[in-house]
Image: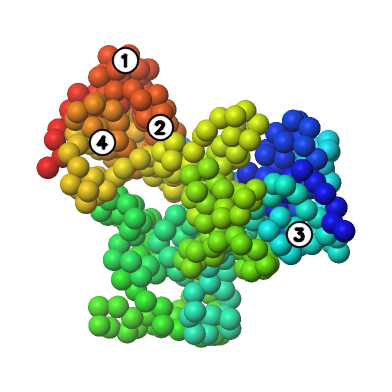
Amino acid sequence: MATPFDAIIVGTGQAGPPLAGRLTDAGWRCAVIERQRFGGTCVNYGCTPTKALVASARAAHVARRAADFGVEIEGTLSVDMAKVKRRKDEIAGRSNESITSYVKHMQNTVVFEDHAAFEGDRRLRVAGERIEAGKVFINVGARAAIPPIEGLDEVPCLTNSSLLDLETLPEHLIVLGGGYVGVEFAQMYRRFGAEVTILDRAPRLMSSEDEDVSQDIRAIFEAEGIEVVTGAEVERVAPDGHGLRATISGDGERWEIAGSHFLVAAGRRPNTDDLGLETTGIDIDEKGYVRVDDRLRTSVDGVYALGDCNGRGAFTHTSYNDHEILAANLLEGDDRKVSDRFTAYAAFIDPPFARVGASESDLRAAGRKALIARLPMTGVARARERSETDGFMKILVDPHTGRFLGASMLGIRCDEVIHTIVYLMYARATYQDVMRAVPIHPCVAELIPTMLKQLQPLE
């Protein structure tokens, strides 16, 4: 006999707890399952702890530049990594405790703290008990993908999760991967004082972005003393004293790089390989992501997949939106879809990079006509006043409708400024609507109307 529930939610990442809250408020009896830490990647291994570390790294960076602003600091600057870690742990710990308490005190809910596996389409076994429900929500997240590099299991290999446990500064951190995770950790640890090398097999850093974005980020990093090696294939790694030595190939050459620590930031893989999905009719793709339709339904009636494991967005905000889509459709009779949202994300480097919608290269590849406006951050008064003039802002507009197609922004506070365009896109506003706005001076976003007056055809 299986214990019946109205809904089973597997995983407590950013989609799970709020969905459980909505369902239980509506009178559903729910089972919530978590085998590790409540809150998932964002709270425990991602956004919250890493941005706490980014803040500490920026404090060190600003302190080193204090003399540029007329501020003299006596003595030698030092970073206490143990204290940095304690601060990070306290911030992430409070978030974890808050979500844990929220879930465990939820009405109409039974919480299981154990691993769960399917034994049928809507039946699971957890903590020795068999449970079933008419609705099952898979929200198991993802983890760092470990590439098949010879010798990787013999060296001080780190992931985005295990790196957070360090209380000492790596002497030389080698970062495998030049995507969002890789660049954030690379700059962070360089600012803490480590020597840092990025190895990226792609021809350029942040290769999914426009080439001008990649070039500017690389220039910013190299100015801070980060070594960036692109088109680099890591053939093998081997122990070398207390560290490691990596054998690299590229452009017909082969060479070695020695380091103390090796961070693997070469993509993610979904946590679906031990869920017992082979006992169900739930379809997964070749990478292990659960296939879902535009309303997050799997190939089995009554089973849904949310968050990172469905391959429809690898961000906290898209995971949270997954729960909003399901709650609206199941409880309010709505018809919300994944395709209703615009892709938006940021890399929390310094200065930050953010993007929404289509990129310039996307539109060129599609042969789509557009208008484009570009402004270097040297043209922004706020950036000059802060002596942070690296980067640029770029906006793309449909020439026929006047609506915004996308934006890419690299510069001071651009992780916030991008929301100007995000909200305009959801409001279906036109650039003509914005040009008469009277923004506040001196701010970064005040230049948006000015940029729009300079729109030119994308050639």
Of the numbered discs 1 and 2, the one sitting upstream in the chain is 2
Could you tell me how far apart the alpha carbons at marks 1 and 3 are, in whole angstroms? 55 Å
Q: Give the mark toward the camera: 1 or 4.
A: 4
What residue would you read off at disc 4? 396
Residue 411 as seen in the image, left or right of residue 92? left
Q: CA distance from mark 1 to mark 2?
A: 17 Å
Of circles 3 and 2, the one toward us is 3
Residue placed under numbered mark 2 in the picture: 422
Q: Which residue is identified by label 1?
A: 437
Please tell me the numbered disc located at residue 446.
none
Q: Do the residues under discs 1 and 2 have CB atoms within 8 angstroms?
A: no
Q: Which label's residue is closer to the chain start, 1 or 4?
A: 4
Does residue 99 lie above or below 185 as drawn? above
Q: Identify the mark nearer the N-term, 4 or 3.
A: 3
Q: In which quadrant will I find the N terminus?
A: bottom right
Residue at horizontal 80 percent and vertical 46 percent from the top: 5
Q: Secondary structure at mark 1?
A: loop
Q: Residue at x 19, y 36 (%)?
A: 370
Residue 72 shows in this picture: no
Residue 7 place in picture, x, y as percent: 74, 45
The amino acid type found where label 2 is placed reads: Val
| Image side of residue 99 versus residue 283, left or right | right
Quick one: label 1 or label 3, which is nearer the N terminus?
Answer: 3
Q: Quadrant of the C terminus?
A: top left
Mark 2 surroundings within 10 Å by alpha-carbon count, few (fewer than 14), some (14 through 19), many (20 or more): many
In the displayed structure image, the side of residue 284 where residue 385 appears, left or right: left
Q: Is residue 41 above or below residue 458?
A: below
Determine whether the residue tagged by mark 3 lies in a helix, strand or loop: strand
The residue tagged 3 is: 124
